[in-house]
């Protein structure tokens, strides 16, 4: 059940009515929300509901045992077992075939055969996000940041709540669980601002991302040898806009839908292509993943506490594992390693005497932005290419001109310009329009919402491709 | 000094939100009725969606009778042609 579909429109309209109707009866409401979330997940494959329930059960039981306040023996061992179980589920479904393939390749190179076969399992939707939520909960309980929840219903709902279930944002237990404690108040949210967030997300996904993907990016990445050097370069920029429009659209809709149901989610994007430096980029791009990697990987590895060399190692390791999280493919590993190396360089530059002297000058800032943006775009080639061979073929095509004429459709440039606008538009504009609209009557809100939706449907191509981050 | 947050009085009731959401969805169905008719039709193999399908077809006919459906189709086709998506 994709967000920009009739299925989800009907599902949301039904959910909204039920959730607010049951709001005074908090436990019943949570039970209904859980049932709706399980139904949402089952719409892809009901067999994986067991996985969701197992993940919830592990989190609940391990959380109860490792609770910092309980001071039980072997808490650290129990935490390790819990994390290992979560990671084992993730590895089995996502990485086992990849590791088997690497082992077989290595054995073949060394001249012997291994008695190994591929497991060929279907990758469950949202398995990575499930794992992130589950690990975040038990680690936070272990660290004493939150008490263990006594309610299995709350834990299951935290892990499976349908707006964030499939592609985030990654919501922390200490932010979300307290919101389950009592009935929600509509007055804590701006209706119009969240309606605009959802409609803006629909525009980014249905118009910008879908057209860029279908008309230009997908054909170019499928067979780069058929396209000119100019087309390949433009396809990289177009993909940069497409992936931002696609992924930020999903999280905008998720945040808006959750808010309309009375739950607050964290921000996930903050105009990332304005970043000055790779460190800044990761504070603006997929912010909840960056914070997760920082808190549950980089800092436990030692963070920046043990000197420059260990800091560099920790940054590199964090980004390589973050890259590999996106998928079992060398392309993601290289993408992560490139970002890791850039982060190390960025870290060193920002602590240098040269940066202290010239870093705030306008020219340096322009160069900083241009380098960061183009580097991020370059790394997207590895992220988008289906294999390492395809990525190197693409890069070779950018380097040597094959003499082909450009076939880039005219619509690509306006779409890229739309993507650029999302990066420079004032970030408070939506809140200001939302507040103004909130002060008008329901008729004005409905008319405004309808006109925007009408325009989106007029512009959108038929059908809707899945969100890019569904595969992760 | 932080200004006190003033909550708009017209938008703090979820039932008002519900009216707006349902109104927007209903207007969208009236403007582009073909999508819902096709969606219901595809899922009506067992006949258990006959009543909603009949209702959707009624909305489709009403939308077509006042020219709203044709306007939406014309605009969609016009936009697609303008960006080179289709030749119509």
Image (cartoon, coloured by chain):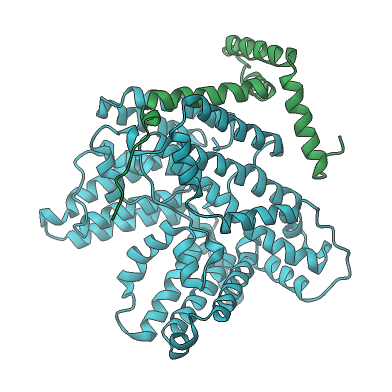
Q: Is residue A120 visible?
A: no
For the N terminus of chain A, the quadrant is: top right
Classify residue A247 as left or right of residue A230: left
In the figure, the cyan chain has which letter?
A
Identify whether A394 is placed above or below A81: below
Task: Identify which residue is drawn at 49% across, 74% down.
Answer: A340
Q: Is residue A465 visible?
A: yes
Task: Identify which residue is drawn at 57% across, 72% down.
Answer: A369
Identify whether A21 is placed above or below B82: above
Q: Position of residue A285 (x, y in %)?
A: 49, 60
Classify residue A28 as left or right of residue A353: left
Residue A264, picture quadrant: top left
Foreground pick, B55 / A90: B55
Residue B36, picture quadrant: top right
Task: Identify which residue is drawn at 47% across, 29% down.
Answer: A12
The total of numbered circles placed on residues is 0
Q: Position of residue A54 (x, y in %)?
A: 34, 43
Q: Position of residue A93 (x, y in %)?
A: 47, 51
Q: Position of residue A403 (x, y in %)?
A: 89, 70
Colour assigned to chain B in the rendering is: green
Foreground pick, B52 / A41: B52
Residue B78, picture quadrant: top right
């Amino acid at each position: 059940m994709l967000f920009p579909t009739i299925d989800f429109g009907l599902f949301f309209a039904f959910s909204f009515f039920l959730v607010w109707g049951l709001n005074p009866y908090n436990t019943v409401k949570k039970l209904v929300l859980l049932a709706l979330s399980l139904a949402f997940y089952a719409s892809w494959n009901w067999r994986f509901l067991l996985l969701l329930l197992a993940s919830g059960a592990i989190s609940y039981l391990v959380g109860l045992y490792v609770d910092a306040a309980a001071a039980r023996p072997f808490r650290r061992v129990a935490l390790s077992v819990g994390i290992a179980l979560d990671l084992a589920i993730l590895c089995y479904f996502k990485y086992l075939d990849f590791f088997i393939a690497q082992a077989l390749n290595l054995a073949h190179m060394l001249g012997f055969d291994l008695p190994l076969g591929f497991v060929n399992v279907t990758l469950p939707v949202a398995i990575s996000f499930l794992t992130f939520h589950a690990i975040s909960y038990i680690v936070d309980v272990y660290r004493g940041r939150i008490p263990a929840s006594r309610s299995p219903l709350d834990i299951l709902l935290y892990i499976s709540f349908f707006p964030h279930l499939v592609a985030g944002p990654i919501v922390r237990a200490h932010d979300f669980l307290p919101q389950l404690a009592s009935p929600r108040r509509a007055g804590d949210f701006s209706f119009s601002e969240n309606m605009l967030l959802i409609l803006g997300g629909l525009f980014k996904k249905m118009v910008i991302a879908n057209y860029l993907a279908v008309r230009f990016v997908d054909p170019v990445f499928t067979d780069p040898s058929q396209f000119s050097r100019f087309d390949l370069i433009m396809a990289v920029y177009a993909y940069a806009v497409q992936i931002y429009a696609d992924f930020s659209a999903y999280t905008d809709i998720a945040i808006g839908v959750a808010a309309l149901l009375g739950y607050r989610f964290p921000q996930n994007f903050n105009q990332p292509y304005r970043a000055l430096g790779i460190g800044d980029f990761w504070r603006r791009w997929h912010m909840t993943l960056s914070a997760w990697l920082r808190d549950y990987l980089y800092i436990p590895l030692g963070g920046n506490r043990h000197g420059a060399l260990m800091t560099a190692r920790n940054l590199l390791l964090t980004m390589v594992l973050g890259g590999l999280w996106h998928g079992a493919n060398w392309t993601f590993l290289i993408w992560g390693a490139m970002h890791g190396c850039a982060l190390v360089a960025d870290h060193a530059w920002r602590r240098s005497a040269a940066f202290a002297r010239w870093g705030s000058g306008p020219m340096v800032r322009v160069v900083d932005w241009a380098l960061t943006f183009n580097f991020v775009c370059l790394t997207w080639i590895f992220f988008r290419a289906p294999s390492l061979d395809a990525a190197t073929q693409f890069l070779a095509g950018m380097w040597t001109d094959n003499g082909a004429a450009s076939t880039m459709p005219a619509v690509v440039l306006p779409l890229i310009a739309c993507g650029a606008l999302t990066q420079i538009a004032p970030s408070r504009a939506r809140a200001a329009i939302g507040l103004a609209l909130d002060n008008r009557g329901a008729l004005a809100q409905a008319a405004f919402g309808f006109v925007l939706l009408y325009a989106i449907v007029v512009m959108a191509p038929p059908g809707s491709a899945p969100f890019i981050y569904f595969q992760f | 000094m932080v200004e006190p947050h003033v909550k708009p009085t017209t938008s703090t009731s979820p039932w008002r939100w519900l009216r707006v959401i349902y109104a927007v969805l209903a207007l969208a169905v009236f403007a582009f009725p073909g999508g819902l008719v096709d969606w219901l039709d595809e899922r009506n193999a067992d006949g258990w969606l006959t009543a909603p399908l009949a209702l959707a077809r009624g909305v489709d006919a009403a939308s077509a009778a006042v020219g709203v459906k044709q306007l939406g189709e014309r605009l969609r086709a016009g936009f697609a042609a303008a960006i080179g998506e289709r030749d119509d």
